Amino acid sequence: MKSHNQTPVQSPPSRPLPYGRQSIGEDDIQAVVEVLRSDWLTTGPAVDRFEKGIAEFVGAEHAVAVSSGTAALHAAMYAAGVGPGDEVIVPAMTFAATANAAVFLGAIPVFADIEPDTLLVDPASVEKRLTSRTKAIAAVDYAGQPCDYASLTRIAAESNAVLIADGCHALGAALAGKRVGSLAGLTAFSFHPVKHITTGEGGMITTNDPELAQRMRLFRNHGISSDHRERSERGSWFYEMVDLGYNYRISDFQCALGLSQLKKLPEWVRRRQQIAARYDEGFLGSAITPLTRRAGATHAFHLYVVRVNGDRQAAFSRLRERGIGANVHYIPVHLHPYYQRRFGTCPGLCPVAEEAYRQILSLPMFPAMTDEDADFVIESLRDVVS
Ligand SMILES: *Cc1c(COP(=O)(O)O)cnc(C)c1O
């Protein structure tokens, strides 16, 4: 049974090789089918089970499941009390959703620069961006490596700001033995197919604060004080809408998939680390520089990012020609037309992020990749960069 469970349903891709890809097994499909045959397709017991599974895994008291990583960030910022006119400090090197979540609530994203070697948010830059209106600081565990939480926690405490971790790259990562999900007041995760485990679309927020957890449960359900199952169990029709919320619920069959995937997460993180070690060794003595690893950090390698000393565009195009799905993560958020137009951000605001953006490439990284796939990427990139 065990070996049958481990067999992926789709054969692992050979070429083209994407930068990230889900692994779905027969066990995952069975878990989803079981829920489809049950009474609850949404707000049911599978949601509770997945929440408990993630809370236990990361070492947090509470977990609230939602419909996407973006919804998780929105809910976290809502719970933190972010509102109109507040400022939220966000690293420039992240996916737009980190900053968008602040904008959803009427707040102003203030972009902090990053460290040149790790591309993680630079605590010194965060400190420079603090004002009396700073309500929250969003930390992004870029590529799967935890930020400098010791410094960020101190800065947040000194400035009365809430530290929110965007852990969408970092499920399974840890710092000094504590997992991402337990390192900040609130941590958001995504279960998009390129992330460590998937529910198709989905997200989760973890926290140790029961009040914040309760606020997020309201927020994901229209701001209503009880859900359908609670009312059904009480035999009552009564409910109240106490604040403006959204429908950010996730279905039970998605949560069944997530819980089934979670069992395989430790093994998948190990495999990502093995591939990273192979890449590291393969690029020694070349013009290709992997990002620096922080001491004491367990890296979960959502992405494997290198800096290319040379023509990045040519390297990108020639990898694509060979069927290697290299990518660029990310265009600094403050350079997007929307942010330039709406918030007046412009080039020069975060010079380290802008410089890194011109050199970075994300290489294929997912657990079903073979050593031969990794070697093909190494040879191809060394070839095109030399
Ligand atoms: C994936 C991701 C998100 C958004 O997650 P979705 O589930 O796609 O909404 C937010 N922040 C970061 C850093 C991400 O990588």
Image: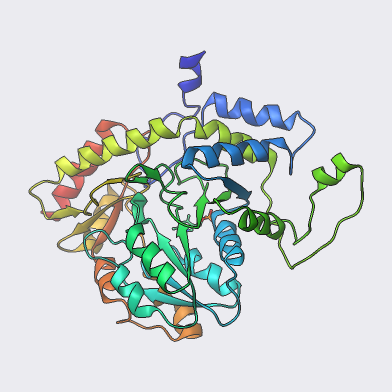
Residue 60 in picture, x, y percent from top left: 52, 45
**Which residue appears at 32% of the width and 45% of the height?**
176
Residue 286 vertical placement versus 374 (above, below) = below
Q: Position of residue 19 (x, y in %)?
A: 36, 47
Q: Residue furthest left?
A: 285
On the image, which quarter does residue 273 sit in?
A: top left
Quarter in which the C terminus is drawn: bottom left
Instruction: Give the percent coordinates (x, y) of residue 13.
Output: 39, 35
Q: Quadrant of residue 37?
A: top right
Q: Is residue 228 left or right of residue 342?
A: right
- Could one spot residue 328 in this view of the protein? no
Left or right of 262? Residue 257 is right
Counting labels gives: 0
- The vertical placement of 318 against 252, above or below, is below
Residue 180 seen in render: yes
Q: Quadrant of residue 118?
A: bottom left
Task: Answer with left or right where residue 89 lies relative to residue 289.
Answer: right
Q: In the depicted view, which residue is nearer to us: 350 or 79?
A: 79
What colouring does the structure picture have?
A: rainbow
Q: Residue at x 31, y 61 (%)?
A: 120
Left or right: residue 103 versus residue 358 is right
Relative depth, front residue between 275 and 46: 46
The relative height of residue 46 versus residue 122 in the rendered view (above or below) is above
The residue sitting at the top extreme is 1
| x and y, in percent, of residue 115 in the image | 26, 65
- Residue located 53% across and 69% down the image: 100
**Where is 25 relative to 54, above or below?**
above
